[in-house]
Amino acid sequence: MGTNDKTDSNDPPRKGVIRMIAGGLVEGDSHHTQKAEVRRAHDETIRKVLDVETAEDTPIIEFGRAEHSGPKNSHNDALVITALLDNYEVGRIFIDSRSSVDILFGDAYDQMQLGDIPLEKVNTSLYGFTGEVVHPREMISLPLTLGTGHTRRTCMQKFLVVDVPSAYTVILGRPTLNAFQAVISMYHIKIKFATPRGVGEVQGDPLQSRRCYVEAVRKGQKRSSNEAPKEAPSSKRGKNGNPEEDPEADRGTPPKVQPAEELLNIELIPGDLEKVTRIGSQMGETTRKEVVQCLRRNLDVFAWTPKIWRE
């Protein structure tokens, strides 16, 4: 399955357990390397089309209805699993096929104490991560193990270390899914992958997924409240040309709503000063006449006193 793959029926000892948390790089970090990767992908596509030889046999990956072990009712749970990362048992791993990179969040990285593993500098930023540009701390290569028993499989994967608050410890994106030849089923809340000894699988954890969702919503709401824009100070000018302070601002009273233009008083019944309304002064003469005529034709819809309104 490749030089980076390891399979063994004996589970390795755990170093520890990492569960709670207290556009990016594809195949290179430079512009030249990324252009070379595009050419390589193109050449690989042509080679597969022209190659008449059968590729190495791989087991068939399929999902049956009897395998469904999620909620009895329909669900929209994310696929969140537990796996071994450098022999640490890491929970809250989010499987995201939309991500072009694998992510190791900074809090999880710090808990794993990986100081003896060399880091690679990263110049490429991530876009669309939290609605803004995110600059990864570094990149690290770690052994990732999925599954158990004789269908367990290990691959060396590159992770971008990102210092962003998250309900998850790790995001496994397309690089890992492709490396493991993995297929996910959201209905079954399960991921399956090919190994030389058959099909391996990891069952998702719906309870863990929902806990992560609740925590992610809470973190998002807290971040939104902290980033709420402040109201701009009053732009009114006093007689001396300096900004005029709003006396109501200190009392926490919202500023009064002011019309956007000067208003004209219109007598709906000519000569009756008690039945007056106002309209904008910036409309054309023809339009103003039409509006006044319309208001006078519909005089009966105006409630001039509470008594009329009750009737």
Image: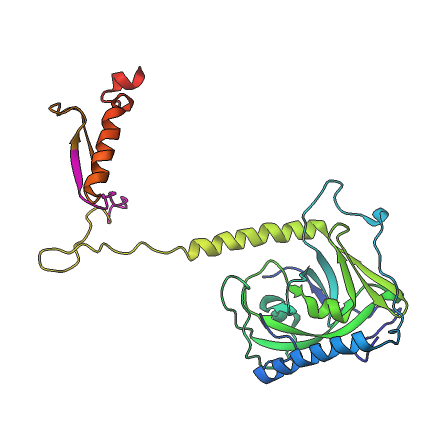
Q: Nearer the viewer, residue 262 or 27?
A: 262
Q: Residue furthest bottom?
A: 32
Magenta span includes 254 = yes
Q: Quadrant of residue 230?
A: bottom left
The percent position of residue 248, horizontal first and vertical second, equals: 22, 46
Q: Foreground residue, 155 or 125?
A: 125
Q: Is residue 111 left or right of residue 9?
A: left
Q: In the displayed structure, would residue 15 be above or below residue 273?
A: below
Instruction: Kindly tell me whether residue 117 is visible in this rendering.
Output: no
Picture quarter with the N terminus = bottom right
Q: Specify the segment rendered in magenta.
A: 250-265
Q: Main secondary structure of the magenta part?
A: loop
Residue drawn at 87 percent across, 76 percent down: 52
Query: Residue 217 at x, y = what percent?
Result: 55, 51
Q: Which of 145/114 is in front?
A: 145
Confirm whether the magenta stretch covers residue 260: yes
Q: Image check: 70 left or right of 128?
A: right
| Quadrant in the picture for the C terminus | top left
The answer to whether residue 263 is visible is yes
